């Protein structure tokens, strides 16, 4: 493992302070594990947990290193220790789901109140001020279009699908229905926003162009903004290949800089990258450009309001390795921010967290099946363990109910009364 590439992973923390913190973290972890419905297996044969034979198994490979990492960095250390191979799990999402379901009780309440004193804070350069946002987005979405193509379906949709009832139980849906389920998700949002012939549509967050393509096919004129040069290039190519270049503009532009007037605004899983302190600007921008009588449809990953408030200043493994500057809203926060800062009001919403769990499972299976292809693109074993942890960590959040994903419709009816 190259320490220059993976400075936080190549070696566990060392020294007297790390040893003391590791011992304390180890005691806290073992105390929590004894109460949880899983099995934690140590090299000496010790097994902790309340799980039966079918429970997920967390196998400790280097327990001292594991404890040193979580002692030094909390839950960041949990992810880094998996990246380093300090522990294994045949059902990684299952193990992480147990932790996600018990997140409020893993650490004793008196110690939870002290978390802000010892956990890392968000680096200033990762706050989503306008001068930082391009860099934050680039670190994730500009990794490689080819990387994302290894585990996404043909629509290149990187957000929750919406599976039809006919697809069967969500925990058993198969890959061959994913592309249609992604298009169904997009079509529902376009329907709710009233997108059709002649609609002037603003899309905040282009992805790789599927929503713009489907809106153009309805006869809409689309202005789509992204901060990923890789996404812009592929989206433009797909749009040109489909013959819609005259209807769709894909701009490399911050959402705050958008001008003009639009009959509809659609944004799919973009608010998560905006940052807590910038939610008012995000919705004020939408309010500013939305034409009278216009509608807004967004898809947003959400968390419970209490957890959102408790973690709004936290710096997590996901921030450090996957989405710098990101933060998930609650439904209550979206309602409050729009009421206090805009004329927009939430009119309708639909939760579909189970659909995201199914989507992530399919991505995870595909990513594992394409491991050799990912390696040939230049992504090493540590990266692949990191990405697997990210997919499973996300799936665990939805399976446990800690996370949800909502399609939310907003308009100005109240302001017009």
Image: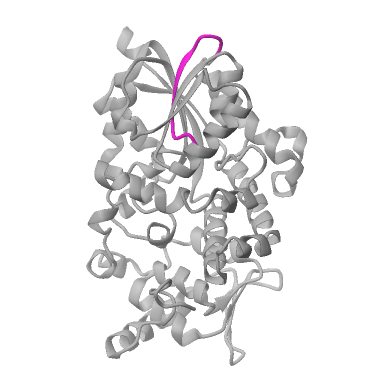
Name the spot of residue 57 as percent of width and height, x first. 63, 73
Q: Answer above or below: position of 352 versus 77.
A: above
**Residue visible at 40% across and 67% down?**
76
Asked whether the viewer can see residue 376, the reply is: yes
Name the spot of residue 199 as percent of width and height, x first. 49, 12
Q: Nearer the viewer, residue 157 or 310?
A: 157
Residue 136 located left or right of residue 102? left
Asked whether the viewer can see residue 326, the reply is: no
Question: Residue 410, located in which quarter of the rendered image?
Answer: top left
Residue 205 covered by magenta stretch:
yes
Q: Which of the image's four quarters has the C terminus?
A: top left
Name the spot of residue 327 as percent of width and height, x first. 37, 48
Q: Nearer the viewer, residue 362 or 340?
A: 362
The number of numbered badges drawn on the structure is 0
Question: Residue 239, located in which quarter of the rendered image?
Answer: top right
Q: Answer above or below: position of 360 versus 336.
A: below
Residue 245 covered by magenta stretch:
no
Name the spot of residue 82 as percent of width and height, x first. 52, 72
Q: Answer above or below: position of 360 versus 92.
A: above
Highlighted range, magenta? 196-207
What colouring method underlies this structural image?
one colour
Q: Nearer the viewer, residue 1 or 359?
A: 1
Residue 200 located left or right of residue 185? left
């Amino acid at each position: 493992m190259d320490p220059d590439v993976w400075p936080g992973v190549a070696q566990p923390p060392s020294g007297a302070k790390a040893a003391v913190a590791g011992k304390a973290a180890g005691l806290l972890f073992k105390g929590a594990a004894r109460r949880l419905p899983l099995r934690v297996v140590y090299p000496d044969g010790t097994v902790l947990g309340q799980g039966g034979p079918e429970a997920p198994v967390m196998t400790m490979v280097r327990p001292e290193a594991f404890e040193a990492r979580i002692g030094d960095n909390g839950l960041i250390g949990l992810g880094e220790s998996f990246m380093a191979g300090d522990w294994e799990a045949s059902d990684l999402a299952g193990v992480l789901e147990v932790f996600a379901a018990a997140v409020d009780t893993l650490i004793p309440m008196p110690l939870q109140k002290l978390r802000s004193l010892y956990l890392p804070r968000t680096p200033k350069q990762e706050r989503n001020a306008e001068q930082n946002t391009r860099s934050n987005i680039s670190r994730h979405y500009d990794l490689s279009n080819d990387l994302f193509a290894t585990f996404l379906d043909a629509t290149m949709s990187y957000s929750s699908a919406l599976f039809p009832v006919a697809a069967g139980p969500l925990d058993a849906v198969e890959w061959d229905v994913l592309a249609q389920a992604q298009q169904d998700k997009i079509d529902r949002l376009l329907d709710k926003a009233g997108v059709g012939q002649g609609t002037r549509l603003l899309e905040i967050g282009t992805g790789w162009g599927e929503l713009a393509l489907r809106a153009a096919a309805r006869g809409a004129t689309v202005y789509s903004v992204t901060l990923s040069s890789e996404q812009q290039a592929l989206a433009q190519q797909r749009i040109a290949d489909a013959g819609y270049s005259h209807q769709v503009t894909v701009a490399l532009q911050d959402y705050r800089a958008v001008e003009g007037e639009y009959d509809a605004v659609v944004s799919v899983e973009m608010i998560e990258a905006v940052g807590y302190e910038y939610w008012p600007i995000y919705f004020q921008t939408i309010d500013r450009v939305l034409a009278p009588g216009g509608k807004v449809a967004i898809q947003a990953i959400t968390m419970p309001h209490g957890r959102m408030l408790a973690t709004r200043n936290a710096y997590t493994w996901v921030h450090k390795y996957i989405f710098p500057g990101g933060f998930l809203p609650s439904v209550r926060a979206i309602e409050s921010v729009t009421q206090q800062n805009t004329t927009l009001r939430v009119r309708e919403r639909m939760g579909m967290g189970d659909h995201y769990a199914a989507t992530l499972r399919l991505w995870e299976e595909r990513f594992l099946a394409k491991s050799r292809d990912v390696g040939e693109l230049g992504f090493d074993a540590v990266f692949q363990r990191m990405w697997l942890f990210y997919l499973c960590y996300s799936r665990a959040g939805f399976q446990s109910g800690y996370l949800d994903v909502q399609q939310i419709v907003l308009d100005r009816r109240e302001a017009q009364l």
